[in-house]
Structure formats: structure tokens, C-alpha cells
Amino acid sequence: MPTVLRVGPYRFHFHSREHDTPHVHVSSPEGEAAFELGPVGRRGSSGYTRQELTRIEEIVVTHEKEFLRRWHEYFAR
């Protein structure tokens, strides 16, 4: 699971065996979630409060272009 970004307690990563639509996973001691990329949308989550999910989604939106670039680079191998 390649890590593409760390922000505070959050680790943003891809699952290396996935090849469906671009998305990013986030995990921390509090929970985990996944967000679609292009456009950003929540795929699912567990353990996070609504406020945490809002903050995480803001991070995903801010870094969406980088996540998409990294997704295409990684899965083009």
C-alpha cells in the first residue's frame, strides 16, 4: 500500500491490487475512509466523526491533482 501523503495523523494511500476508478484511502488511529477522485466524493468511512471527515475531504480536494497523478503513475506500471 504505497503512501502518497501524510498530514497530521492521516496517511493517504492506495491499495496496490486495486484498479477501479481512481480513489485514495486514508487511515489513522481513529478510523479509515476512502474518497473518489475526479470529482472528490466520499466512498465510505468508519471511525471518523463528521467534522473529521470534512477536514479529511478538504485535504483530499487540496491534493486531488497530486493524488490523480500518482494514481495514474502507480497503476500504469
Image (tube, rainbow, N blue to C red):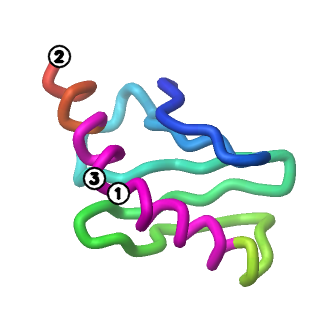
Q: CA distance from mark 1 to mark 2?
A: 20 Å
Residue found farthest to the right: 29
Q: Earlier in the sequence, mark 2 or mark 3?
A: 3
The numbered dot on residue 15 is none
Residue hosting label 1? 64
Q: CA distance from mark 3 to mark 1?
A: 4 Å
Q: Residue at x 32, y 45 (%)?
A: 66
Q: Position of residue 4 (x, y in %)?
A: 47, 33
Q: Which residue is at 35% across, 46% downward?
A: 67
At mark 1, the secondary structure is helix
Work out whether 1 lies above or below 21: above
Determine whether label 3 and label 1 are within 8 Å by CB.
yes
Identify the image quadrant of residue 30: bottom right
The amino acid sitting under disc 2 is Arg
Q: Nearer the viewer, residue 29 or 61?
A: 61
Of 71 and 44, the residue lying toward us:
71
Which three-letter amino acid code belongs to the residue tagged 1? Glu
- 67 falls in the magenta region: yes
The disc placed on residue 65 is 3
**Location of residue 19 in the rendering, given as x and y in whole percent from the top left corner:** 25, 38
**Which one is earlier in the sequence, the residue at label 1 or at label 2?**
1
Is residue 75 found inside the magenta-colored segment of the image?
A: no
Q: Quadrant of residue 49?
A: bottom right
| Quadrant holding the C terminus | top left
Above or below, comparing residue 26 to residue 41 in the picture: above
Q: Amino acid at mark 3?
A: Lys
Q: Which mark is residue 77?
A: 2
The magenta stretch spans which residues? Answer: 53-70
